[in-house]
Image (cartoon, rainbow, N blue to C red):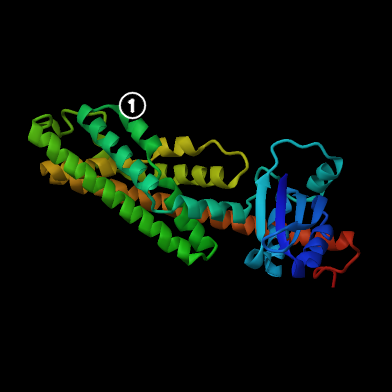
């Protein structure tokens, strides 16, 4: 169940109310006349079955509510309502499987903002990965993977193509390029520093000295397969109401460790590791982006069919002819 809070300008209040009242997926509506000060107008609260939320939100967007007012989308963690239960029962599909595109797109825009916090997490995660490589510590590698914030922009690449939000595509590419470039540059400088201090030498870098982390610069066919599977699970976790799988995605892909090894290997002139880690990074990012795009495209196709089925069901409930009936 979702709750919509709509701040509607006075000129659109009647249409917003009619839109909400006319949809059987909306189980309850409350209106505060004159409750919206900016814009001047009315405030509406509506409980909507998650499976049908896209249709209701799209109709509000068609009215232009978002241009002058606001549409808030909030999940309802607990609720008791027989009308709400009835609304969910007649809505095709499952609420746990449904994708609320406005919700996913908003999160993607937030995750692709190249701000100080994003860059800090990228740099810190990559530095931890570099230390893990020197110490040959799988535990630190896992920690660096979890800390890295790069999955959000990667998932946004596929979302931007599926939803045709090309401004999001540019934003995601910029975030990834600038984020990894900054992290690798800082790690390179860190490598030069520890090398000058004598803490790490070129002899410390090599598969013979660190067998547990040599996979970072030796990609194989499994690198791509794991990236595809992990990204598919990550996208499902982002779009479903049942979240919780993102940590597993972070631990599964070798992006942050590869970036850490690129910076470290550049500092010590280990060019074969630079090449291998760069290839590992490209393979993982490509597999994740491709899997994200395919997963989101399939979900969009499925829910487009569900929306069409719901439109026919709603028309029959109202006694109107549907395209398939004519």
Q: Nearer the viewer, residue 189 or 320?
A: 189
Tell me the quarter of the image containing the N terminus.
top right
Q: Which residue lies furthest to the bottom in this view?
A: 326
Badge 1 is on which residue?
139
Q: Point out residue 254 in the picture as x, y percentages from the top left corner.
A: 34, 41
Residue 48 x %, y %: 75, 50
The residue drawn where x is 38% and y is 58% is 173
In this rendering, the answer to whether 209 lies above or below 86 is above
Q: How many circles with numbers are drawn on the protein? A: 1
> Residue 170: x, y in percent?
41, 63
Residue 202 shows in this picture: no
Left or right: 187, with 17 as reference point? left
Quarter of the picture containing the C terminus is bottom right
Position above or below: 38 against 29 = below
Q: In this view, does 90 lie above or below 323?
A: above
Q: Which residue is drawn at 75% across and 48% down?
A: 49
Name the residue located 78 percent from the left edge and 62 percent from the top edge: 311
Please, which residue is most extreme toward the front here? 37
Q: Is mark 1 on a helix, strand or loop?
A: helix
Q: Label 1: few (<14), some or many (≥20) within 10 Å?
A: few
Quadrant housing residue 213 = top left
**Residue 319 in view (yes/no):** yes
């Amino acid at each position: 169940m979702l709750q919509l809070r709509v701040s509607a300008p006075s000129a659109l209040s009647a249409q917003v109310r009619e839109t909400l009242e006319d949809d059987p997926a909306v189980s309850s509506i409350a209106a505060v006349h004159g409750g919206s000060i900016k814009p001047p107008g009315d405030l509406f609260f509506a409980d909507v079955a998650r499976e049908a939320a896209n249709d209701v939100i799209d109709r509000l967007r068609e009215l232009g509510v978002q241009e002058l007012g606001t549409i808030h989308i909030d999940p309802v963690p607990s609720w008791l309502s027989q009308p709400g239960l009835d609304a969910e029962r007649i809505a095709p599909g499952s609420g746990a499987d449904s994708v609320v595109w406005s919700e996913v797109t908003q999160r993607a825009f937030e995750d692709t903002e190249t701000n100080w916090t994003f860059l800090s997490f990228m740099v810190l995660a990559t530095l931890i990965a570099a230390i893990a490589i020197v110490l040959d510590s799988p535990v630190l590698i896992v920690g660096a993977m979890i800390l890295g914030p790069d999955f959000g922009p990667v998932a946004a690449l596929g979302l931007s193509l599926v939803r045709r939000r090309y401004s999001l595509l540019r934003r995601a590419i910029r975030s990834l390029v600038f984020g990894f470039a900054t992290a690798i540059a800082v790690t390179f400088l860190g490598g030069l520093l520890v090398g000058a201090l004598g803490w790490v030498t070129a002899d410390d870098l090599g598969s013979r000295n660190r067998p547990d982390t040599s996979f970072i610069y030796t990609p194989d066919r499994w690198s791509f397969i794991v990236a595809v599977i992990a990204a598919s699970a990550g996208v499902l976790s982002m779009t479903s109401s049942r979240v919780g799988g993102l940590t597993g995605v972070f631990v599964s892909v070798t992006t942050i460790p590869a970036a850490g090894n690129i910076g470290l290997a550049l500092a010590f002139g280990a060019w074969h590791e630079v090449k291998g880690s760069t290839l590992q990074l490209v393979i993982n990012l490509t597999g994740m982006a491709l899997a994200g795009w395919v997963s989101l495209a399939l979900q969009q196709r499925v829910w487009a069919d569900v929306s069409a089925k719901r439109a026919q069901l709603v028309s029959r409930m109202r006694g109107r002819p549907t395209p398939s009936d004519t």
